[in-house]
Amino acid sequence: MTSPGREATPDDGRPMAIVTGAARGLGLHLAGQLAGRGLRTICVVRNPLDTARLDGFGDLVRPVVGDVRDAAVGRRVAREVGEGAVCLLIHNAGVAHPPRTLGELAVDEVLHSFSTHCLGPLRLTQALLPALRRSPFATVVHVSSRRGSFAVAAEDDAPGGKHYAYRIGKAAQNMMSLCLRQELAGLRIRVVAVHPGELRTAMGAPGAPDTPATAAADLVRMVLTHPQEGLPPFMVRAGDPHPW
Ligand SMILES: NC(=O)c1ccc[n+]([C@@H]2O[C@H](COP(=O)([O-])OP(=O)(O)OC[C@H]3O[C@@H](n4cnc5c(N)ncnc54)[C@H](OP(=O)(O)O)[C@@H]3O)[C@@H](O)[C@H]2O)c1
């Protein structure tokens, strides 16, 4: 489902990018950065009413409405791509739940996080593999988090509730990213997991040091200008390695 009132954009041969969770926060800024660099950009947005937020980015940006946990999203995006080539797929959609003790934890929260950060992106990449292969080379970015790092979690031994859902979901996303990286390297598709920084978004802390605008600019610059070889498998947004 594309947003009403938008005419189909002909496949003009431009490189195509896809961003999930583009209604706000980092994803919205990623969409603006990509369109600003001349890429046709398909944005997965959950709420149809939010597609209007993309209007200011011009005709290069097109919304696809859907929840990344729904398998139908892959089919919708693939239909929108048509016979085009996708050079960049950014799995950005994310959800956070508060810290919980084991007694408080609703296990469905873990399933929600796992579906959003791991299963949904895995299905979407699967649906778009033919389009990624049509690009001379392509990049798949998993916007992960330092909270998905075992090394970081092991340092945080404070008693009390834990971010079970978020950490488990992001750790699963990291492992999925590594498996895909190893499998797809031979197809000229590089796959990376990225910690974007601590951002002042709805999900981030109010006093977080970075803006989503800065993070999006850094991430897009790094991905589009870094040589195809040599990006670490898990990194911070400017390209330095992050511990697993
Ligand atoms: N903010 C930080 O400090 C920080 C730190 C490390 C990593 N990250 C990661 O960075 C990414 C972007 O986060 P953000 O800070 O920009 O958060 P945000 O402002 O809360 O935005 C999250 C976006 O993801 C979308 N989304 C959530 N679940 C979805 C689903 N099932 N299907 C489709 N879209 C969905 C939301 O859509 P709705 O608008 O419909 O809710 C929203 O557009 C996330 O993966 C997050 O884990 C953020």
Image: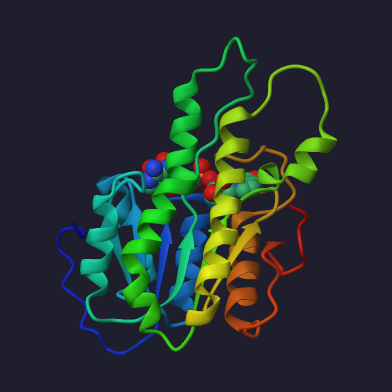
Height in image: 114 above or below 12?
above
Q: Position of residue 128 (x, y in %)?
A: 34, 68
Identify the residue at horizontal 29%, vertical 81% (top origin). Answer: 84
Residue 130 in sight from this viewpoint: yes
Q: Position of residue 23 (x, y in %)?
A: 40, 51
* Left/right of residue 203 with respect to residue 132 in the rendered view: right
Q: Position of residue 141 (x, y in %)?
A: 54, 64
Instruction: Classify residue 238 by image quadrant.
Output: bottom right
Height in image: 71 above or below 39?
above
Find the residue positioned furthest to the top.
Answer: 103
Q: Position of residue 15 (x, y in %)?
A: 39, 84
Instruction: Classify residue 78 by image quadrant.
Output: bottom left
Please say which color scheme the image uses. rainbow
Q: How many numbered callouts?
A: 0
* Left/right of residue 72 with respect to residue 44 in the rendered view: left
Identify the residue at horizontal 30%, vertical 75% (top origin). Answer: 59
* Left/right of residue 62 with respect to residue 100 in the rendered view: left
Identify the residue at horizontal 67%, vertical 65% (top origin). Answer: 233
* Left/right of residue 19 with respect to residue 213 in the rendered view: left
- Check the picture and name the quadrant holding the N terminus: bottom left
Q: Front-most of 238 and 179?
A: 179
Instruction: Classify residue 41 by image quadrant.
Output: bottom left
Residue 200 in sight from this viewpoint: no
Height in image: 4 above or below 66?
below
Q: Front-most of 48 and 102?
A: 102
Q: Front-most of 244 and 160?
A: 244
